[in-house]
Image (tube, rainbow, N blue to C red):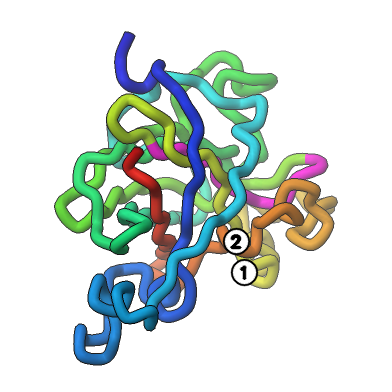
Amino acid sequence: MNEFDRLTRRGSLLTLGGFVAAAFGWKASESAGAGPAGVATGAVTCVLTPEQTEGPYYIANEHVRRNITEGRSGTPLTLRTTVVDASSCKQIKGAAVDIWHADAGGVYSGFGTGAGNRTFMRGIQRTDAKGLALFKTVYPGWYAGRTVHIHVKVHLGGNVVHTGQLYFPDSLTDKVFGNAPYSSRPGRDTRNATDSVYRNGGKLSLLSVHKNGSGYLAAITMGIHRS
């Protein structure tokens, strides 16, 4: 049995305030109260965020790879996930970040019309010395009953220490979906405010998203308990 099969769930945390806004690391200096020193003084806090359902489309033992598109069309999306220790906000090296999401047409690999392929829009990356795991993908499409999202698990030491979902601002999704190939599927029926999963803590899992060439760069920092 490998470490991705030995699954237990624990609480997870997301840093708030300036830490989340930075997303790419500590922007302010230590003297300004950022980083681990800021945690010690209380200037930076980490708070528990609710676990969210894994959903019905998880497939274990995904490929360890950065590019998960397999050539499928869609607006390019670079996803930066940073994993930190909740008690100190120090970056954690070697955590396995596991993501999966629908393609631009709202289809999951391994299920329904995507049943013939079990790997597109799925992948695992280990965090580097800065706690960063980077993925190359496309902006997810929508499917009935759910707002647009990316599923995520964080594995550490053979355990799942976080299971959650990552979300996008509705205004940005509206903009992206005005272009091909998304525009061929109008009528998105669920937004963040009306999504049953998002309502239970999704606001704490909103991605920070910025334009990046012809696509977007999305980032979030997730804090975990090591044990």
* Residue tagged 2: 168
**Residues at circles 1 and 2 in contact by the CB criterion of under 8 Å:** yes
Q: Is residue 91 visible?
A: yes
* Residue tagged 1: 172
Residue most extreme to the left: 129
Rendered view: 59 above or below 146: above
Residue most extreme to the bottom: 32
Residue 1, quarter of picture: top left
Instruction: Give the camera-side residue of 16 and 117.
Output: 16
Residue occupying the point 41% across, 80% down: 18
Q: Tell me the kind of residue under disc 1.
A: Leu
Q: Where does the image place residue 91, in percent across and percent down from the top left? A: 24, 57
* Residue 122 tag number: none
Q: Where does the image place residue 175, in percent across and percent down from the top left? A: 64, 69
Looking at the rendered structure, the secondary structure element under dot 2 is loop
Residue most extreme to the front: 41
Residue 212, quarter of picture: bottom left
Residue occupying the point 32% across, 25% down: 158
Q: Where does the image place residue 163, in percent across and percent down from the top left? A: 52, 39
| Residue 155 as seen in the image, left or right of residue 16 | left
Q: Which residues are magenta?
A: 144-154
Instruction: Give the camera-side residue of 11 and 54.
Output: 11
